[in-house]
Amino acid sequence: MRIAIVTESFPPDVNGVAHSVVRVAEHLVHRGHTPIVIAPAPSSATRGFPGDHPYPVIRVPSVAVPRYRSFRLGLPSARLADALNEHAPDVVHLASPFVLGARGMAVAGQLDLPTLAVYQTDLAAYARHYRLGWGEAAAWRWLRNIHNAADRTLAPSTRSAADLVTHGVQRVWLWRRGVDSVRFDPALRSAETRATLAPSGELLVGYVGRLAVEKRVELLAATSRLPGVRLVIIGDGPARRDLERALPEATFLGARQGDELARLYASLDIFVHSGPYETFGQTVQEALASGLPVVAPAAGGPLDLVEPGVTGTLVPPEDGAALADAVAELAGDAQRRRAYGLAARTWVANRTWAAVGDELIGHYRAVLAGAGVPAGRRIAA
């Protein structure tokens, strides 16, 4: 098959949308398909990117998002239509469609091309937090129009699928994300890394993710003050300076990737997540693959990823005291941490990118055939 992936984000962006698009496109090539990626142009500071990819990457003009200038919005342009015409795809895959994706949907409709839209970002929450001039109701109207024009929408978690259906989106199926359980491995635990981060033998509690207002990382303030605990923040973003002031006891490492990130995960004792707006929660899944017990809000994607009392603890959303209490309880119980970590690693064993990539190819084929997928996959509207 020939697939055109129109995405709102792509490296050098560091986020779930960009990462999943890279993994999907790589898998398509591996399976003998022919993808292209159409993505916003990066900022001038990273213009040397994207580096080498085993598929074409077409960049369209972009502008910085107000209040989050490191993120670029792709603008509708003739380059998108030209790319679709030239590639002649069998299916157009719209990754977290919003602005560029809306234009991609319109062009695909004009060309009578089958479309599949992947919901991955809680844009209504973004509109509220970044004051983009849209209310939540307006954001949902926009998203509903885009997704209802698609032949089907894929949601990453049961909660996000339910949100879509509640807001009038039709033809919703569940399609979760994969994790690289070879890269993220408890065996990478490093005594040297631990000694550097916790020279007095503190328990290492880590957060990994973008430092942005919607992630609510400031809720970890009470956790950072727990005795015998060192809170490690891995990631970067527009809220970093404010968070460094709000969490003076925490260690901020900035963005880390690849093998270094995997080693940091494995060297932690507990993973903590604070954001209540995750449609999936890829960093939670990477922590589970790294054999870590997880503390996260009982909201969004973590509801599917964390089994309370087995792989971690879920707490009320936006409750910093509850996060700290759950971390403190695990910090005082090494046996439970070990049991949760072993169960976490087992839980992700079959959630490889190859497995979910093949599932996605099945969705492409079903869209082309106009057929359904196995019973139980579709979310009833």
Image: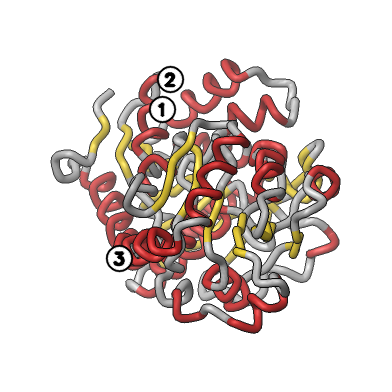
Is residue 2 or residue 112 the one in the foreground?
A: 2
Kind of element beneath mark 2: loop
**Mark 3 Cα shell of 10 Å, populated few (<14), some (14-19), many (≥20):** some
Give the distance between the C-alpha atoms of the residues marked 2 and 3, in whole angstroms: 35 Å
Pinpoint residue 80: horizontal percent, then vertical percent: 60, 49
Query: Does 25 sit left or right of 261 as displayed?
Result: left
Are the residues flagged by discs 3 and 1 in contact, CB closer than 8 Å? Answer: no
Pinpoint residue 93: horizontal percent, then vertical percent: 44, 49
**Mark 1 Cα shell of 10 Å, populated few (<14), some (14-19), many (≥20):** many
Residue at x 39% of width, y 63% of height: 335
Q: Is residue 345 visible in the rendered structure shown here?
A: yes
Query: Does 179 sit left or right of 36 as displayed?
Result: left
Residue kind at label 1, given as amino acid type = Leu
Q: Relative to residue 293, is residue 345 depicted above or below? A: below
- Residue position marked by numbered label 3 in the rendering: 346
If the image is split into quadrants, where does the N terminus sit?
bottom left
Q: Relative to residue 115, is residue 332 depicted above or below? A: below
Q: Relative to residue 328, is residue 52 depicted above or below? A: below
- Mark drawn on residue 180: none
Residue at x 67% of width, y 68% of height: 256
- Residue position marked by numbered label 1 in the rendering: 164
Kind of element beneath mark 3: helix
Is tag 2's residue or tag 3's residue first in the polypeptide sequence?
A: 2
Query: Does 33 sit left or right of 280 as displayed?
Result: left
Give the distance between the C-alpha atoms of the residues marked 1 and 2, in whole angstroms: 5 Å
Residue at x 53% of width, y 64% of height: 269
Kind of element beneath mark 1: helix
Give the distance between the C-alpha atoms of the residues marked 3 and 1, in whole angstroms: 30 Å
If the image is split into quadrants, where does the C terminus sit?
top left
- Residue position marked by numbered label 2 in the rendering: 167
Are the residues flagged by discs 1 and 2 in contact, CB closer than 8 Å? Answer: yes
Residue kind at label 3, given as amino acid type = Thr
